[in-house]
Image (cartoon, rainbow, N blue to C red):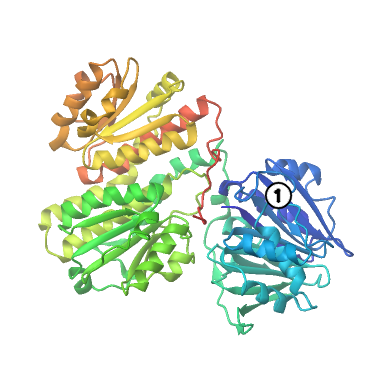
Amino acid sequence: MCGIVGYIGTEQAAPIILDGLSKLEYRGYDSAGIAVFDGEKIITQKAVGRLKILENLTCGGERLKGFSGIGHTRWATHGAPSEKNAHPHRNKTGTIAVVHNGIIENYSILKKKMQNKGYEFISDTDTEVLAHLLDYYYQGNPLETIIKVLHRVEGSYALGIMFADHPEAIYAVRKDSPMIVGKNDKGCFIASDVPAILKYSRTVYYVDNQEVVELKKEGMCFYSIDEEKLVKEPVTVEWDVNAAEKAGYEYFMLKEIYEQPATVNNTILPRIKGNEIVINELGISDDELCKVEKIHIVACGSAYHVGMTGKYIIEGLAQIPVDVDVASEFRYRDPILQKGDMVIVISQSGETADTLAALRETQKKGFKVLGIVNVVGSSIAREANSVMYTWAGPEIAVATTKAYSAQLTALYILALKFARVKVIMKQNQYESMLTCLQHLPDQIELLLGQKEKIQYLANRYAGSKDIFFIGRGIDYAISLEGSLKLKEISYIHSEAYPAGELKHGTISLIEEGSLIIALATQPKLYQKTISNMTEVRSRGAKVMAITFESNKLMEKAADYVIYIPETDPYFANSLAIIPLQLLAYYIAIGKGCDVDKPRNLAKSVTVE
């Protein structure tokens, strides 16, 4: 969840590190710090709050002279946000500095041992244990010291480390928390995510679990935890540098909402050849797909909501039973997997801790995993048996929009592929659905051009204390995501319920003036949903309906109607979610919220 950037080379390190950290602000943080070797010693500067404070204290890094350094944006886990808890942490003499993402699970035991050996702790963090352990084991060889420490710590970590005695090198270490390294003709970089160094290098190496990297200005060496040299292959990042910039938009979130037509098209285009779906990257034959008898979709947050939609679509089109699990529940409930089962994990970052753990738990049981991810070379992409990339490009805002839409599209394609190989669907229906799928980007574009009504409704309800979303079937899955978008960036209490559950408790919360957002994109369920809308209106609620243009029944049943273009009802989520994303965005803007960096949230959840 935190951000790490390091640099060693021929350029001044501090401005590069601060610039890289600014590209990782989306990850969530509450303090920041930097350490630089100035030619004689390691000097540090820390600040609580936004990175801008640290930039001002250091004049954009100009006050910290030196050609090597490490920096960090911290998300408080152990200890409150404060200067003493901010990274980097150092040993007592200030000759070793370390930044850390993750959690050291046995830190309290290690801390007690180090205190018994006379070490004093000034912070409340688990990371300071690492600084003192490095000091304790240091005998002049940094690599040997780091490996000794790694054998004694438990938990997850991505580390950046520097030793004053060895100013010619910085070190990167990784276990269960993302870390990359890169290089150009002026030096080498470490970072916890690609956008931090994309401006400087497109050549990156993904650090695997329990690997140590020694970086010098002229290059880098990789080592295993047994101190054996490793050979790593570089990856060329194909992202457009401008894709990680705002490009004139006030917020990344709005930019990414408007990138959805292209994103959905990028997910569809390479996988449709004529009238056939071809997903060559899966490495799974049609015969193997035909033998799948049950699917388990495992994910967190918005990706879990994608899975909920996928359940309705795959069961409806391919007649394959689907279970959908929150990853943190799946890994701990000892799931029953049987021959013929397929496990699909979904994650934008490919680093989501619980999802990654569920993948590994599945593989331990002897079952293969298909990963649907956005980030090439991420942990899930590397460890899954098969991978389907969404090609959404960098998504910077914490609240996902275009990655969600790309994941949905990937599941549409998979559902149609399963239906095709199992010969469940008639040819004319299959071709009709392919046509609908290919029209989605243009229809999303059309919706984005009709935002004025949504802005009006957002202004009207920005002062709401509670907003409820209801729907049936796929509409319930859409409601879950619409509600999440609203609450995570506007801080308005919001809940989503299956419309039929209103009478089982929820309706007691409805009062005069409450806003109910009703999703009605499934024609077979229109009348049932209208009945639920009537129930809440009779109790004084206002109802906003989202439905297809042909559904004029909603004019009488709702106070406000937002129409979406006609498509196959199975694909309705891709269109209905657009006004819900815009509604959440404009309500949050109306309340003065920072929509890109909502409080207490982070883009990539890499700890439990």
Count of numbered tags: 1
The reply, left or right, for residue 598 in relation to residue 200 is left
Q: Is residue 246 above or below residue 217?
A: above
- Which of 115/87 is in front? 115
The reply, left or right, for residue 516 in relation to residue 526 is right
Place of residue 332 in the rendered image (x, y in percent of width and height, measured from the top left): 37, 59
Residue under circle 1?
A: 85
Place of residue 209 in the rendered image (x, y in percent of width and height, measured from the top left): 54, 71
Asked if one can make out residue 548 in the rendered structure from this viewpoint, the answer is no
Q: Residue at x 83, y 50 (%)?
A: 62
Which residue appears farthest toward the bottom when viewing the image? 228
Q: Residue at x 32, y 73 (%)?
A: 283
Place of residue 147 in the rendered image (x, y in percent of width and height, measured from the top left): 66, 76
Amino acid carrying mark 1 in the image: Asn
The reply, left or right, for residue 55 in relation to residue 484 is right
Q: Is residue 262 above or below residue 12?
A: above
Helix, strand or loop at label 1? It is: loop
Which residue appears farthest toward the front when viewing the image? 116
- Which of 246/97 is in front? 97
The reply, left or right, for residue 500 in relation to residue 63 is left
* Residue 199 falls in image quadrant: bottom right
Place of residue 434 in the rendered image (x, y in percent of width and height, measured from the top left): 22, 53
Which residue appears farthest toward the right when viewing the image? 40
